[in-house]
Image (cartoon, grey):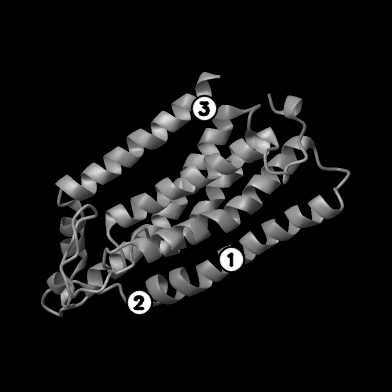
Amino acid sequence: MLKPYREVLALAASAILILWIGQFTDIDLRLGDMMFDRAKGTFPMRDTWFADRFKHVILKSMLTGLALGAVALALRDTWRPWPQWTQERRLGMRVLAMSAIGVPLVTSLLKRASSSHCPWDLERYGGGAPYIRLLERMPGGVDPGHCLPGGHASSALWLVALAAFWLPQQPRRALAVGAAMLLFGLGVGWVQQMRGAHFLTHTLWSGWVSCAVVWVNYSLAKRDSIGYSSVPRNATQ
């Protein structure tokens, strides 16, 4: 019974840490300065084939295809259950499918509600917007930037839900898989930082959102609370 409380505390503590980094340090700006070429007035990685075409288009399309595949398999199993699937696999697939939808959706909704601008839109890097921290108010007459959390990273961060395939029987392996997928998603976000599309905290908030959404989906599926999990309660306790 203590485990859910530990998870809630971990999410709360990590949110406070990310908020502190963004509000009381200059890590975002220092990293942005490192990636910006002042002599040329641009982010050199912005239009490279790897960062723009491969990472932002090709890889994102592949990940979107995987997400659609996960959703299709989960829906197919809901309509006509696969007889060879174990209850653990069924639970994992449905958490994965829900996260494939939920992580990008929640990230997108939070972006639309945010005022933060992307680095390449800031006065500091040749744009016209001021740099405003998360808890600061945007000056009058300045349109919101809608750039936090990082949306592109969410196209990969839903894969954190792969950890559900090893829960609750193999928690260490689940943690390892989840951590590996989290690092992968943060790596995708890091390339966006190199392009000038996001700050570090934008990517960190994307990672936090993914973990929170996956945890909620797993908790709901395990308890069969909203009807999309056919796993008996006693099968996952």
Q: Earlier in the sequence, mark 3 or mark 2?
A: 3
**Residue at left offset 27%, top offset 63%:** 116
Q: Secondary structure at mark 2?
A: loop
Q: Which kind of residue does numbered mark 1 sit on?
A: Thr
Q: Secondary structure at mark 3?
A: helix
Can residue 37 be spotted in the picture?
no
Q: Nearer the viewer, residue 126 or 108?
A: 108
Q: Nearer the viewer, residue 227 or 76?
A: 227
Cβ atoms at labels 1 and 2 below 8 Å apart: no
Q: Where is residue 139? Give x, y as percent.
A: 15, 67
Q: CA distance from mark 1 to mark 2?
A: 22 Å
Q: Which residue is mark 2?
A: 48
Q: Where is residue 206? Give x, y as percent.
A: 40, 53
Left-right relation of 211 to 33: right
Q: Where is residue 115? Give x, y as percent.
A: 28, 64
Instruction: Decide: few, some or many residues near mark 3? Use Cα within 10 Å; few <14, some 14-19, many ≥20.
Output: few
Up the image or down, 1 lies above or below 100; here it is: above
Q: Where is residue 188? Give x, y as percent.
A: 42, 59
**Residue at left offset 41%, top offset 72%:** 50
Q: Which kind of residue does numbered mark 2 sit on?
A: Thr
Q: Which residue is mark 1?
A: 64
Q: Which residue is mark 3?
A: 4
Can residue 6 be spotted in the picture?
yes
Up the image or down, 114 lies above or below 14; here it is: below
